[in-house]
Structures are given as C-alpha cells and as structure tokens.
C-alpha cells in the first residue's frame, strides 16, 4: 500500500463491509425471518454477498498494491445497491425493514458513493502516471 488514497480506501471499504454485515441477519440487527423471503430476495442477497466479498478482495488487493484494486473497489459498492433499492421499495421482504436497518442502508448508500468516488480518483491517478522515466 503506497499512497494515502489507498489507505483511506481500505478504511472506507472496511467500514462498508462492517455495515454490510450488520444489515444482514447474521449481524443481529435484522429480526426478519426467512419465511417472508421470495426468490427475488435470495437473488438480491446473493448479489449483496458478492459485493461484500469483492469489497474484501479489494481491501486485500489494495494492501498488496495491485493495479486492479481500484477497479474492484469501484465495482464492489455497486453490487450493494440492488438490495437497498429493493428494501426501500418494500419488494425485498414481506415485512417492512425496522428503522435501524433503514438507517444502516442510508449509511451504506452514502458510504458507497464516497468509495466509488475514491476508487475512480485512484484509477484516474494510476492512468496518468508515466510508465517509464
């Protein structure tokens, strides 16, 4: 991890993953059971989990200094949005989300915008660097 931006992006991605886990029933804040879930719910949960796994992958790649890390960090937060949109429109689950989950979803959405912006800036900076002296 060379740049300050990479360090900031690692911290933001780690916070995004932490909040993402808290939103799930495994985080203990969502009391809704699986009985009200539909096929759409499980599909969106799968996309959400892929987003969390990609966020963890981006953290590892940023620490290692990989060139593909900003691209992964740019794509990962985008996969968190379908669940938030579906839950906000009340098509995600038969029960309405509790207020704590709704607040966390707003936090995840806002944080993901910041992560996407940081990753885009990091990608742009990587493109403008000269490859040889």
Image (cartoon, rainbow, N blue to C red):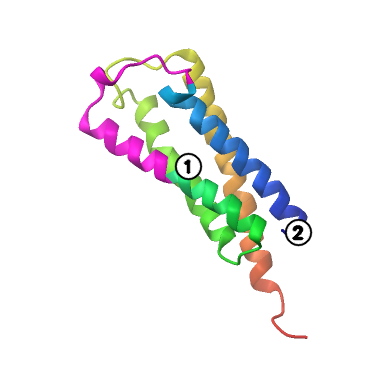
Residue at disc 2, secondary structure: loop
Residue at screen point 61% across, 63% down = 123
Between 112 and 28, the one lying in front of the other is: 28
Q: Is residue 47 above or below residue 133?
A: above
Percent from the top left, x then y, of residue 38?
A: 22, 27
Marks 2 and 1, the one that precedes in the sequence = 2
Residue at screen point 60% across, 43% down = 13
Between 26 and 15, the one lying in front of the other is: 26
Q: Quadrant of the N terminus?
A: bottom right
Q: Is residue 46 magenta?
A: yes
Percent from the top left, x then y, of residue 5?
A: 72, 54
Give, as a single range, the part of the protein colored magenta.
Answer: 28-50
Q: Quadrant of the C terminus?
A: bottom right
Q: Would you name the residue on which mark 1 appears?
A: 52
Residue at screen point 52% across, 52% down = 57
What is the number of the mark on residue 3?
2
Percent from the top left, x then y, of residue 99?
A: 48, 14
50 with respect to 92 (left or right): right
């Amino acid at each position: 991890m060379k740049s300050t931006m990479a360090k900031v992006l690692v911290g933001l991605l780690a916070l995004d993953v932490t909040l993402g886990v808290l939103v799930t029933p495994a985080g203990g804040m969502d009391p809704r059971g699986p009985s009200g879930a539909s096929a759409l719910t499980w599909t969106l949960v799968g996309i959400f989990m892929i987003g969390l796994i990609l966020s963890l992958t981006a953290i590892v790649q940023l620490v290692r200094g990989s060139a593909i890390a900003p691209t992964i960090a740019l794509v990962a937060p985008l996969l968190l949005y379908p669940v938030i949109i579906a839950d906000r429109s009340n098509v995600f689950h038969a029960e309405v989300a509790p207020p704590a989950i709704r607040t966390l979803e707003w936090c995840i959405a806002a944080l993901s915008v910041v992560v996407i912006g940081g990753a885009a800036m990091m990608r742009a900076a990587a493109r403008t660097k000269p490859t040889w002296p």
